[in-house]
Image (spheres, coloured by chain):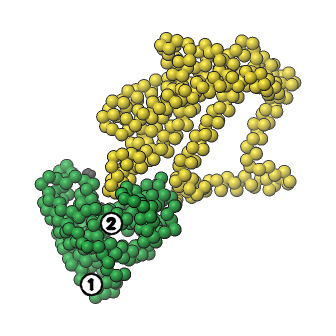
């Protein structure tokens, strides 16, 4: 697919972001810069604060006054669960809260793009897990977001569906060009998709690796295993175990 | 969907188990839906036979045939329709008031913290009162005319709707609310597109309870010195030992209750078409 991304927007810049729950400091003076239109993956142990960071970037959690947040807008989020409203047809879910004219037409085109053109009038309860997650992707993209946040969007899908979703997300990213940040537990997924992989630990970005592999990427690529090993090391996984 | 499978499986099972005995009985094949009515029909026939044999005196219970004849007579004379209209009017007005009040209070309590503090505590306390025990007080307050009857029906309808709608609003999945917020819905949009539709299934259950409770209230209310209505018809018949007319009145109550229930079920089917169990079935 040709690179016809719309003109890039502002970079994302976060400074001095601290987030506490009671006495538990989850984010501790976090700093983050993302180039416009870049694709970044965020790794980290369970409970390291990845979702907390994403929620703050999405505007779902209030940011403390002393933090600096320069964020591209509009923002869209895809959660681990599709979070479709069960009482609205698929196209109505995608068109939810859309301003401007022809909401239905735009929703239909977005669903077309994720391969759900035949399910416009379906109830969400009738979709498979993969289809529902694609509908959630369409709902995120129909708003032409400049910042796209994905919180373990494929964790609940089977391996085959996940592979299809990977290439779909990459296509959509190339096509629409939002600054993209994906949280994942899967080191392979991170290296496969992203240009840059961050590791969140101790409330900060503890590691920052550039993935300089040509696309489309495969597990068999020479650089792949090296990157994978380094990331697993950052995550504190014993290399012998992981092999 | 695992839900639907779980819902479908028991049905398939019963159909199978039901089919086995019919295959053993040659020729006599009665559809399963009709089979359900066989034993009630047998009971009515037994009742008729017992009445005809003089085992049940008409002063205890009139024969089914007499009940039918009386019902027909009451319809022809216009007596039953006019009493029915009076009763229906009481239920409709009472329901209108009770449902409106229940919905309004549930919205106030469900949609704002302040509202909950003001409304919910007294409602939870009042609901523990058996409201039918308020009759003497109502008579003192409202006299013995239409007002206490309508008030009792309204009270019976208000609480179930309040409780279920309030619980429904509070039970809406926070994750859905959050997602809708990300996609730019303001407070009004949230209420309209997420919170109210999410609370609807629970509220419709409440509506069914409310209707049942309203009928019950009507029956009790019509014992209060009524001069018209199905309850009056029954009380009047008692004075003349007309058990046939009493049974007619009871049947009318039962039919009205069934009809109301069917209406709500229809509304449920249309309003909740999105539910997994209804989507496929
Ligand atoms: N609303 C909250 N109230 C209290 N503590 C919270 C809240 N949200 C998150 N936390 C805590 O903050 C920490 C980070 O949570 P978060 O969900 O961001 O982790 P995560 O990195 O996304 O983990 P996972 O990989 O398991 O999804 C956890 O210890 C969690 O218990
Ligand atoms: Mg998380």
Q: In this view, which residue lies farthest toward the right?
A: B53
Which residue is at 34% across, 63% downward? A143
Of the residues under marks 1 and 2, which one precedes in the sequence? 2
Instruction: Indicate the quadrant where residue B239 lies.
Output: top right
- Asked whether, in this view, residue B38 is left or right of residue B125, the answer is right
Q: Where is B48 relative to B266, above or below? A: above
A5 sits to left or right of B239: left
Q: Nearer the viewer, mark 1 or mark 2?
A: 2
Quarter of the image for residue A75 reads bottom left
**Secondary structure state at the residue bearing disc 1:** loop
- Residue at 56% over, 56% down: B279
Spatial CA distance of label 1 from label 2 is: 27 Å
Q: Position of residue B204 (x, y in %)?
A: 52, 41
Q: Which residue is mark 2?
A: A144
- Residue that carries the numbered disc 1 in the rendered image: A213
Please state which of residues B19 and A141 is positioned toward the viewer in this rendering. Answer: A141
* Relative vertical location of residue B53 with respect to residue B199 in this rendering, above or below: above
Residue A59 horizontal/vertical position (percent)? 25, 56
């Amino acid at each position: 697919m040709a690179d016809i991304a719309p003109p890039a927007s502002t970079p994302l810049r976060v400074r001095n972001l601290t987030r506490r729950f009671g006495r538990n400091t989850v984010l501790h003076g976090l700093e983050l810069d993302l180039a416009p239109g870049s694709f970044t993956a965020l790794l980290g142990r369970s409970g390291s604060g990845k979702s907390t960071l994403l929620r703050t970037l999405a505007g779902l959690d209030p940011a403390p006054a002393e933090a600096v947040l320069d964020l591209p807008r509009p923002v869209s989020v895809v959660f681990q669960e599709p979070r479709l409203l069960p009482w609205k047809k698929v196209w109505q879910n995608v068109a939810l809260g859309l301003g401007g004219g022809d909401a239905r037409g735009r929703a239909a085109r977005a669903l077309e793009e994720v391969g759900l053109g035949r399910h416009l009038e379906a109830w969400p309860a009738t979709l498979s897990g993969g289809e529902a997650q694609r509908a959630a992707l369409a709902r995120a993209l129909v708003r032409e977001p400049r910042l796209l946040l994905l919180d373990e969007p494929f964790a609940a899908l089977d391996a085959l569906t996940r592979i299809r979703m990977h290439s779909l997300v990459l296509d959509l990213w190339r096509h629409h060009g939002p600054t993209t940040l994906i949280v994942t537990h899967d080191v392979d997924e991170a290296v496969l998709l992203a240009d840059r992989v961050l590791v969140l630990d101790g409330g900060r970005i503890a590691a920052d690796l550039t993935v300089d592999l040509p696309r489309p990427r495969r597990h068999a690529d020479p650089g792949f295993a090296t990157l994978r090993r380094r990331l697993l090391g950052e995550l504190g996984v014993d290399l012998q175990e992981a092999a | 969907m695992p839900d639907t499978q779980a819902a479908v499986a028991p049905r398939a099972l019963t159909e199978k188990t039901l089919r086995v005995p019919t295959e053993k009985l040659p020729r006599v094949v009665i559809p399963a839906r009709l089979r359900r009515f066989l034993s009630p029909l047998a009971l009515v026939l037994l009742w008729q036979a017992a009445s005809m044999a003089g085992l049940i005196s008409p002063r205890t219970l009139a024969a089914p045939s007499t009940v039918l004849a009386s019902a027909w007579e009451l319809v022809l004379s216009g007596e039953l329709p006019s009493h029915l209209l009076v009763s229906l009017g009481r239920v409709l007005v009472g329901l209108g008031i009770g449902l409106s009040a229940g919905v309004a209070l549930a919205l106030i309590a469900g949609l704002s913290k302040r509202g909950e503090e003001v409304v919910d505590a007294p409602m939870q306390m009042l609901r523990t009162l058996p409201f039918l025990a308020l009759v003497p007080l109502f008579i003192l307050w409202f006299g013995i005319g239409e007002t206490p009857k309508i008030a009792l029906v309204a009270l019976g309808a208000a609480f179930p709707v309040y409780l279920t709608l309030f619980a429904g609003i509070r039970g809406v999945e926070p994750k859905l609310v959050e997602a809708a917020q990300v996609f730019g819905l303001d407070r009004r949009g949230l209420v309209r597109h997420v919170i109210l539709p999410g609370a609807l299934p629970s509220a419709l259950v409440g509506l069914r309870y409310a209707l049942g409770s309203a009928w019950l209230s009507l029956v009790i209310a019509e014992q209060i010195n009524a001069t018209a209505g199905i309850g009056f018809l029954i009380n009047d018949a008692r004075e003349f030992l007309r058990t046939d007319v009493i049974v007619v009145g009871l049947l009318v109550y039962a039919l009205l209750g069934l009809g109301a229930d069917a209406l709500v079920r229809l509304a449920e089917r249309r309003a909740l078409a999105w539910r997994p169990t209804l989507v496929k079935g």
